[in-house]
Amino acid sequence: MARNRRSDTPTQRTDAERERAREERERRRLAGQGNVAPPLPPPVATPVHDPVEFVAAPHLPRRASRVRTGAARVGALLALTVVLVLLAAAAVVLVRRANRSTPPPAPKVVKVVIPEGYTGAQIAALARADGLRGDYLKAAAHAEHAGRLRPSAYGAPAGIPEGHAASSLEGFLFPATYELYSGTPVSRLVSEQLTAFRENFGGGEVHRAKALGITPYELLIVASIVEREAAIAHDRPLVAAVVYNRLRLNMTLGVDATLRYALHDFTHPLTESQLASRSPYNTRVHKGLPPTPISNPGAAAIAAAARPAHVSYLYYVAGADGCGEQVFSTSYAKFERAAAAYREALRKNRGRVPTCGRK
């Protein structure tokens, strides 16, 4: 009969079971010695090595790390955006401060100096040379059409001789110094001139014209002749007196400056054919005043035309000494002698006006 025997192959036990058996043996040994062994602790459940949990567990920290990394990137991007916005704002502030600290250069101011006695055509050339913009004579014509000033309100006849007067506002374009910006339209200059004219030719001059038996426009024509003929202040009321005296006597004025205005030439000697011209501005041929003013007179010439000297002179001619005074006379004989002296002075000076020798 066969004997029972243990299997030669030991049963496979876990480390926990072996540790448990060891502790049991030690407890029994101590009990045999009279010692009470402490109760065994409850068995510890051996963890089951679940491959899913074992594999998934290491991924939990990685996922959290990715979340933290993404948040860090978003934060960094926001911080960079804030910095860029602040830098842009600072740049705008700096640019604005720079613009305030360096303002654009002011426009250039030009002084348009218009001498007394200049014609509209001469003023047009002056305005162009001073850097004003536009056609001066057209601007003057437009000012009249727009009603800025109507010569007819001063007694001017309708229309002016075509091809002679430079502007229908001739005489009203007051000469003075005007400060304007370079490039200003010429219409602005015309506007300021008309304003200045009204300030210097008003009710007093209108009243004086009536007292003299003429229209305000005719007084302005006389003033324009005085401006061209009188070189010094002393002669202005005397020249005005000669003009009025000859008008009362129905004599021709014989003023060469009126014909020169029509010819647009105030410098060259007049020829015989020019002196015989039938132009309405030839006051050697036609009696009375020329159709329009022949210049734009200043305040002094207007005052002289309004208040002429109380003299009986009928003639005048430039003095032979070249100092600018006119030689006035009541008789033609005296006038001829003064004129002969002037012609001789020109001959001796090779056709040029003598130089004044006074200091």
Image (cartoon, grey):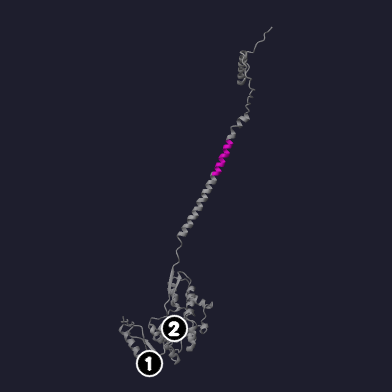
Viewer-proximal residue, 127 or 103?
103
| Residue sitting at the far top | 1
Task: Give the residue number, with chain letter if any, for mark 1.
Answer: 332
Looking at the rendered image, the quarter that the C terminus falls into is bottom left
As measured in the structure, the alpha-carbon distance from the residue carrying label 2 to the one carrying label 1 is: 28 Å
Q: Amino acid at mark 1?
A: Tyr
Viewer-proximal residue, 356 or 352?
356
Q: Earlier in the sequence, mark 2 or mark 1?
A: 2
Task: Give the residue number, with chain letter if any, for mark 2.
Answer: 303
Q: Is residue 333 left or right of residue 206?
A: left
Residue at 51% x, 76% y: name it: 143
Tag 2: Cα neighbours inside 10 Å, few (<14), some, or many (≥20)? many
The segment highlighted magenta reads 62-75
Secondary structure category for the residue under label 2: helix
Residue at 62% x, 30% y: name it: 53
Residue 107 in percent (x, y) is at 45, 66
Viewer-proximal residue, 339 or 97?
97
Q: Amino acid at mark 2?
A: Ala
Residue 97 in percent (x, y) is at 47, 57
